[in-house]
Image (spheres, coloured by chain):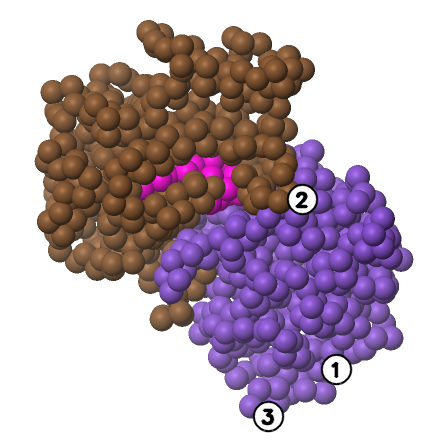
Chain colours: A purple, B brown
């Protein structure tokens, strides 16, 4: 730690304990080497971009798992799918090191990179988040199938490490996938409660990666503003229905181990503590939906629009009773309803973390270009997402109102310890 | 007022005074007819969609001027440019009446339309804002030149009322306008602190207008989350610079009369109390900017990036001294700097109310598709916006980093009194 850094560090009266806490390394059972600690302290310079000098609105970047997965959903997302253009593994490793450092900085409300103001250089940080709260920013990295093998080439000598699970999803009936929304060697998901902070994160990470990766596709999304609506628990999608009522309880370690995190024996070992992200860019035919009767809408979802309760029930969290019949012997929740098919026999559980998107008008049709950036995290796409989507694709009533335009699968890397870097277990162990 | 409405009204313990206040009709010197008051009271049903039962986060819709012009900028915008497809003036008038009613409902946190839940009909309100705060929603309507004359046809018998000012902007040097971002018979600007509330407003207004108008183009935009950043006054654009430092002071009646609101003698009389909106969709070449030195960036804007102060000054609000020279006799602020050219001799002042936009990746270039949805309100485009833009288009250094892709001019109608409707002075007086 340089003298200048030490002075500014003391100037700010940030206690070491508090610093460690905000860096997310006060956790139970976490061991950090001297180099890791040094990295943290060296980062404690005076160039905070944030007006919040306390821990408010900060989500620790370092930890056993990456943030942005079990983190309570923020109100904006920017998902970037990337293609790697360098063919040098060392450059890729260096990139993940730089991304880790930059992400740790931004998520704690600090600027990216060297903060000397040499005005004969481009600024290290692009500046649009200066003065803004860290806004619960999380940054989550994943690797796609094509990082391991593309056009039959083992690009980075990683093929032996490729998980069997990490393959493109099968083509489902009615899929209308477009290349421009599909696939990717890598992904970065940035989420925060401020679209400007979210944009700043992706933009600066792309900038760091210049010449090594290119943007393949990107999609922003939103949820209702959390600060203004704390009472509202389950956000509504653009069809007006609550979305995400049934979800993995991430506060329950057993549920998370069973459904979310890749376990030691699942293999490969570098992914232990990671998870799989499935992304589906689902266009919603807003105008068609809006001409549909409430009864049809509710039968389509299998839930009441107002309360979110299963049809015939009162409360959003009432149990889905799929066998219950009405007085005429008809299933109360049609077996073609979205909730019924998504639930199936209740075996598959995934952690849904989806956002709405809106991109103005679709110039081809003149209709609103809006929908759902569906994202789910799961331990095994084969055992969880795929069987659910097979049921839905076959006979979900909702298919009349939506179209799957994009698709991608990524293995989300395990978290990094301070001093280490995201991807370390994949690239170097 | 029906008995049912009256009962629910009493149930909620909303005092008449408070209701009048939240409807924005407690203002000084405001006269309302009996029918106007009746309209308000009839609207006080029990179908609030909002969790906020008080006046928090509500901006009055009714008033001398439309809201969303001098309103403190909310953090999200949805601008919709529309083409009228009906050829019946009566339908157009009916549409503005329905829009007025729906806007008054949504801005006070109520659902649109009939709230009976007949499940054999499509719901009157699309539902995605249910449970959300009104989030300071404002809805602002404007009319474009082509509403008055299109293909040499006086479509609605309004040609004699067309303001001389309401014409397409001249083609400026370097303009790269695309049809898909240009023009429009009508516009609706919705702004709120929640993108879901903003989307809901535009979507429901479009739905009401089905068969009468079509969407021509649309653009969403954002600013930093206000709730999290109250200390930060002037938002930064995506080039990292504060944007909007010099602006009309809307708290100063004299300034507003001089620069913002169309006055009685400006003509035509139906627009008195209205204003002109200029929209420019300006693409920003993010990646090019990010390779530019800080010195070049600051010389381009004529301001320091960090503080926002004019070059050579300390404070954001220090006076722009355009004649000041450095020790070598060189102008401290280059005469090609954006701030210098925008300021000119200081004669033209406009009310800027611009938002950043980001639409993922531009599939043609692979670059970020981001920029500024520039919007300014002014009493006279000819005397204010056009001379400024002529100076900028000629030699603004910033032109190297931006491209004007869209353009439109609208006359923003004066405000409506409760019981009246937006557009009343244009269509019926």
Q: Which of the labelled discs sits on residue A152, or is there none?
A: 3
Q: Nearer the viewer, mark 2 or mark 1?
A: 2
> Mark 3 belongs to which subunit?
A
> What is the quadrant of residue B245 in the picture?
top left
Look at the numbered disc 2 and give the secondary structure of its residue.
Answer: loop
Q: Is residue B289 above or below residue B73?
A: below
Q: Is residue B60 above or below residue A256?
A: above
Q: Is residue B293 above or below residue A157?
A: above
First-in-chain label (1 vs 3) = 3
User: Residue B7: x and y, percent?
Assistant: 64, 15
Tag 2 near tag 1, CB within 8 Å: no
Have a look at marks 1 and 3 and say if they share a chain: yes
User: Residue A8: x and y, percent?
Assistant: 56, 41
User: Residue visible at 60% across and 53% down?
Assistant: A355
User: Residue visible at 23% across and 35% down?
Assistant: B411
Look at the numbered disc 3 and give the secondary structure of its residue.
Answer: loop
Q: Is residue B82 above or below residue B423?
A: below
Tag 3 near tag 2, CB within 8 Å: no
Residue linked to disc 2: A305
> Mark 2 belongs to which subunit?
A
Residue B196 inside the magenta-drawn segment: yes
Residue linked to disc 1: A164
């Amino acid at each position: 730690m340089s003298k200048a850094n030490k002075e500014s560090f003391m100037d700010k009266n940030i206690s070491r304990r508090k610093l460690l806490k905000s860096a997310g390394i006060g956790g139970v059972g976490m061991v950090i080497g001297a180099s890791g600690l040094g990295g943290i302290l060296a980062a404690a310079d005076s160039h905070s971009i944030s007006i919040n000098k306390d821990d408010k609105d900060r989500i620790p970047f370092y930890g056993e798992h990456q943030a942005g997965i079990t983190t309570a959903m923020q109100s904006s997302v920017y998902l970037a799918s990337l293609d790697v253009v360098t063919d040098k593994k060392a450059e890729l490793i260096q990139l993940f090191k730089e991304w880790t450092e930059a992400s740790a900085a931004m998520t704690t409300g600090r600027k990216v990179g060297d903060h000397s103001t040499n005005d004969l250089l481009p600024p290290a940080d692009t500046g649009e988040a200066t003065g803004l709260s860290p806004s619960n920013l999380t940054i989550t990295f994943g690797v796609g199938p094509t990082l391991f093998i593309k056009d039959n080439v083992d690009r980075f000598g990683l093929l032996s490490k490729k998980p069997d699970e990490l393959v493109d999803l099968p083509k489902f009936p009615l899929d209308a996938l477009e290349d421009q929304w599909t696939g990717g060697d890598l992904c970065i998901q940035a989420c925060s409660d401020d679209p400007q902070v979210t944009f700043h994160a992706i933009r600066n990470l792309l900038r760091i990666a210049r010449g090594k990766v290119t943007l393949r596709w990107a999609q922003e999304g939103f949820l209702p503003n959390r600060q203004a609506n704390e009472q509202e628990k389950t956000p509504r999608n653009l069809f007006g229905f609550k979305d995400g009522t049934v979800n993995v309880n991430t506060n329950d370690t057993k549920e998370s181990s069973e459904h979310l995190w890749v376990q030691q024996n699942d293999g490969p070992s570098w992914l232990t503590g990671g998870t799989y992200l499935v992304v589906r860019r689902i266009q919603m035919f807003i105008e068609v939906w809006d001409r549909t009767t409430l009864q049809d809408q509710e039968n389509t979802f299998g839930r009441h629009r107002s309360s979110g309760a299963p049809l015939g029930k009162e409360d959003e969290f009432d149990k889905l009773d799929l066998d219950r019949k009405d007085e005429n012997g008809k299933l109360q929740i049609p077996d073609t309803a979205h909730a019924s098919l998504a639930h199936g026999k209740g075996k598959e559980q995934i952690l849904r973390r989806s956002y709405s998107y809106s991109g103005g008008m679709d110039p081809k049709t003149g209709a609103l270009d809006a929908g759902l950036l569906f994202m789910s995290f799961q331990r095994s796409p084969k055992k969880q997402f795929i069987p659910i989507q097979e049921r839905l694709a076959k006979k979900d009533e909702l298919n009349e109102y939506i179209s799957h335009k994009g698709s991608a699968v990524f293995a989300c890397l395990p978290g990094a310890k301070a001093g280490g870097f995201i991807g370390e277990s994949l690239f170097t162990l």
